[in-house]
Amino acid sequence: MNRNPFRNLDVGIILMIIIFMGISTLLIYSSTHQNPSYNNFYIKNLINYFIGFIFLFTLFFISNSFLKKYSYWLYIGGISSLILVSIFGDEVNGAKSWFNIPIINFSFQPAELMKIFLIMALAKQIETSLANSVNLTTTNVFYILCIFFPPTILVILQPDLGNAVVYMVILLVVLWVGNLKYKVFSFILSIIIIFVTLFPFVFNKYNDEIKTTLSDYHLSHWYSRINTFINPNDASDDAKYQVKMSTIAIGSGALFGDGFLKGDTTQTGRVPYTYSDSIFAVLGEEFGFVGSSLLLLLYLYLIYRIILIGQECSKDIYNAVIIVGICGMFLFQIFENIGMLIGLMPLTGITLPFVSYGGSSLIINMICIGLILQINKTVREN
């Protein structure tokens, strides 16, 4: 008798993704139904979810050893795509980071795909490094940085600040799980804390010089977003408009919200990018504090389930690093997206996982879930 091929599938995580799909579709419909140019985005979102589920289940059935074997090759493919998009890609919002596929009317962002390839390559390198050592050595860290810097530099040159920051977060969390010596990790973390603390003072002291330099390299939007975050009162009206209107929308939702399709601020087009970057503002205004809290609880439960899987494979370095890398990536993107809408974080254009409209980001997130489910299956089978 054939055994059920789905016997080791974590149904709980699948149900979570289906719930996210429903929430995402409702919010995207709410934010676009009055605009003829975007009123089919909720349908496209469902199609993207369908494609994402295909990738998810495909990865679920691929062997763990196969993925491990080709981690470096996938990484090289990701680097190649970043190079190609810098030459042949389409420019959107000042960043040359998209491939447009006109036949199927689909735009793809290689920097999104590079997230998972980077995690896999780092996991493979850390596993190799720890084969003969309890802790990562200086030489090991050098090899890890050799993997980290090429995609990060290529993404910065596009320029895409948001994904570059995500890569940095991925590096930090995988170094932590990779048994980097406590003193070394503490030293790196201290440097980051000192940099973050001093950066606002340095930025304000050399404000004009930084503005001129970034403008020379066509990075004016970087300056605008950083200046809006550090000096919200001095920023231009255009620069702080998204944060201001998003905060108003979220605050006006009060406890239970204004109701579905009844958000005064988001329904009248006063909040930009409500279907993507600012979709949490739609949730806050229409469903209030209760609706926003329920979404955050769903995220926490998803992260909790992922952590449980990570604990089960803690002795398998490769899989453990992948789990922690994906978990760290999700947590940062959630915090950054919501934080930037209420002024706690700078604007970066990072989407809200599984909720914001965006084919590339959604499909990559689904691939990440597929990897997690595949690792969980491997652990249960062994």
Image (cartoon, helix red, strand yellow):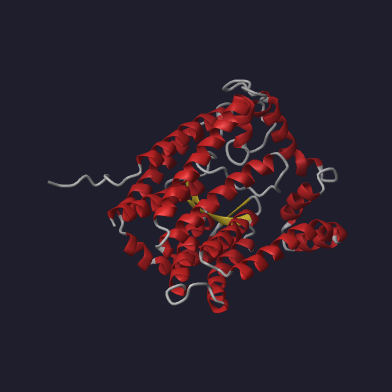
Horizontal side of 207 relative to 121 (left or right) equals right
Horizontal side of 92 relative to 298 (left or right) equals right
Query: Considering depth in this image, is 31 or 368 the residue closer to the camera?
Result: 368
Q: Residue at x 56, y 37 (%)?
A: 296
Q: Tell me where residue 168 appears, x and y as whole percent.
A: 60, 61
From where the camera sits, is residue 136 visible? yes
Q: Tell me where residue 182 appears, x and y as whole percent.
A: 60, 67
Q: Farthest residue to the left: give it.
A: 1
Horizontal side of 191 relative to 47 (left or right) equals right
What is the count of numbered marks? 0
Q: Residue at x 56, y 73 (%)?
A: 141
Q: Residue at x 48, y 63 (%)?
A: 78
Q: Tell me where residue 44 appears, x and y as whole percent.
A: 46, 38
| Picture layout, residue 300 above or below residue 215 | above
Query: Considering depth in this image, is 123 or 21 the residue closer to the camera?
Result: 123
| Picture layout, residue 2 above or below residue 145 | above
Query: Considering depth in this image, is 20 or 364 the residue closer to the camera?
Result: 20
For the C terminus, the image quarter is bottom left
From where the camera sits, is residue 31 visible? no
Horizontal side of 216 relative to 41 (left or right) equals right
Q: Residue at x 65, y 29 (%)?
A: 266
Q: Tell me where residue 128 appears, x and y as whole percent.
A: 43, 73
| Picture layout, residue 24 above or below residue 106 | above
